[in-house]
Image (cartoon, helix red, strand yellow):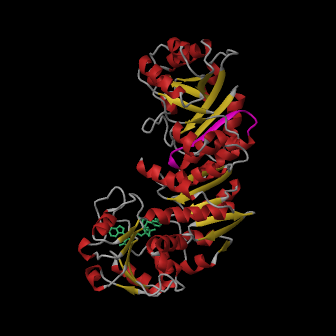
Amino acid sequence: MICIPVTGRDVEKMAQEMAVAAEQADVVELRMDYAPGADLRRLLKDRPRPVIVTYRAKRQGGMFEGPEEDRLRLVQKAVDLGAEYVDIELDAAARIRRNPKTRLIVSHHDFERTPSDLGRLHADIVAAGADIVKIATMATDIRDNLAIFDLLRRSKKETIALCMGEPGTISRIIGKKFGGYLTFASIRAGRESAPGQITARDLRTLYRYEKIGWGTELYGVIANPVAHSMSPAIQNAAFEAVGRNAVYLPFKVDGDPVAFVNAFKAIDIKGYSVTLPHKEALVAAMDEVDDLVKRVGALNTIFNREGRLIGANTDVSAALDALTAALLTEKERRSEEPPLKGRVALLLGAGGAARAVGFGLLARGVRVFIANRTHERAEALAREIGCEAVALSDLASVAADILINTTSVGMHPNVGATPFPAALLRPGMVVFDAVYNPPETRLLREARAADCRTLSGLAWFVNQAAAQFELWTERPAPRNVMEKALRERLGK
Ligand code: NAP
């Protein structure tokens, strides 16, 4: 079940928000501590959904500041009025008289951390007479979620358990897989009643919450930051399109990614996408890697074959396939010659994307020059993969017929920036931008104006995601669905 808390400051606002929340929620939580004087009887009379009534005390992260006696009187009134659920803190539960119509959610919140011994806390809440146990703890590390999943799995009593904070967001999405009674979601972005909540709309449409259950396979992207990743949108759309019982999650890993992957073996993740800044570090955590990963020294995909984690790199072929498919003429495509052989490419950037593309270009017989803001990095990468470095002040000296931007210059929100002077763009030049947000960057606009052939990073992104999907599922990826989902997400 999805529960949306409403936090209006008076009875009118509460009633309005309850009506809106009811469109997305199975249960509405009336956070009466935001409006303790509001007429609860009136709100209950018109309720469109079952409700949880909560007068959260300040000491447990709520807004209620008055005397405890007053608060308990209000909670008792909610029970006496027959609200479906009433939330009461563990340390006050004994003071509430029961009513058979009302189920008591006995709760405990820890806004500092996730204690290791949740079992004892859970037992104390059960012993206090809870109909439903609620435990919400702050995640300081994404691995804290595992304690919550373990608790849910072992619990015989109906239990709501979740981690707060951004690293805890996944517990709000997949707690149900481990037996969680309900999850909390916000009515809209910006109206979260606790840190890490996502919107009910995202829960339903992006993560397909209704379909999550014991048998749901888990996938996700390992990144930091992860909040703006497009991967959940496109991979979840792909799973939905092929009817697979799977959900793809955002894993914000700001600590050691190897420790994360090893810990999450406990919940049998079936596959990962890996992006900045973890592509190199995770190679060490694999049971096996493909040849490309060995040569490039970076992976962007992990798949799980009967518990063994295998690292792969779909970045290289994704970029080169996009370049080949979009930019060669029909005649060039049909020719026996390797299509890119003998061309000259200028690569802007010396990070992970440059390494993947540079490697792929060289393997296809392209002569490659690398230019980068930090020239020493360009030199180091050029030495490593076997090509030439060129100073940014000397770009005009390279007669490139392919220009590839692998820096983040021009990416949202800095859409006015470009990594290459327009004056150096020549007609017929192929210009490929790794940036896909926005799909048309200033570099690509200027390149089109200069009669260059252009290619957005979108094709690269969809290619690498589709190849990941195929490694995980061993079936063709619904590429059109994935591209559509990406464009929709970018449009928002
Ligand atoms: P990375 O390893 O962090 O490298 C970033 C590169 O951008 C470095 O060369 C860095 O130069 C340069 N850079 C950053 N800010 C700059 C600025 N203000 N001015 C000049 N240069 C700047 O990142 P990455 O993994 O290579 O990714 C780079 C870009 O490619 C990102 O925008 C990413 O989204 C995109 N990408 C797209 C796809 C796709 O599927 N379309 C795939 C992979 C990557 P310094 O060395 O001087 O710091």
Image-quarter location of ligand 1? bottom left
Taking depth in this image into account, of 83 and 27 the one nearest to the observer is 27
Taking depth in this image into account, of 168 and 3 the one nearest to the observer is 3
- Could you tell me how many numbered marks the image carries? 0
Expressed as whole percent of the image width and height from the top left, the position of residue 225 reads: 46, 56
- Which contiguous range is marked in magenta? 155-166
Q: Is residue 161 magenta?
A: yes
Q: Give the farthest residue toward the front.
A: 331
Expressed as whole percent of the image width and height from the top left, the position of residue 485 reads: 51, 51
Work out whether residue 65 can be spotted. no
Please name the residue shown 29% across and 79% down the image: 392
Task: Quadrant for residue 3, please give it.
Answer: top right
Work out whether residue 107 can be spotted. yes
Task: Quadrant for residue 28, please give it.
Answer: top right
Please name the residue shown 75% across and 63% down the image: 306
Taking depth in this image into account, of 239 and 326 the one nearest to the observer is 326
Expressed as whole percent of the image width and height from the top left, the position of residue 54 reads: 54, 24
Task: Using residue 306 as the reference point, say whether residue 138 is left or right of it.
Answer: left
Please name the residue shown 28% across and 60% down the image: 416
Expressed as whole percent of the image width and height from the top left, the position of residue 147 reads: 65, 48
Task: Using residue 68 as the reference point, say whether residue 125 is left or right of it.
Answer: right
Task: Using residue 73 as the reference point, say whether residue 217 is left or right of it.
Answer: right
Taking depth in this image into account, of 67 and 286 the one nearest to the observer is 286
Considering the image in quadrants, where does the N terminus appear? top right
Q: Is residue 26 magenta?
A: no
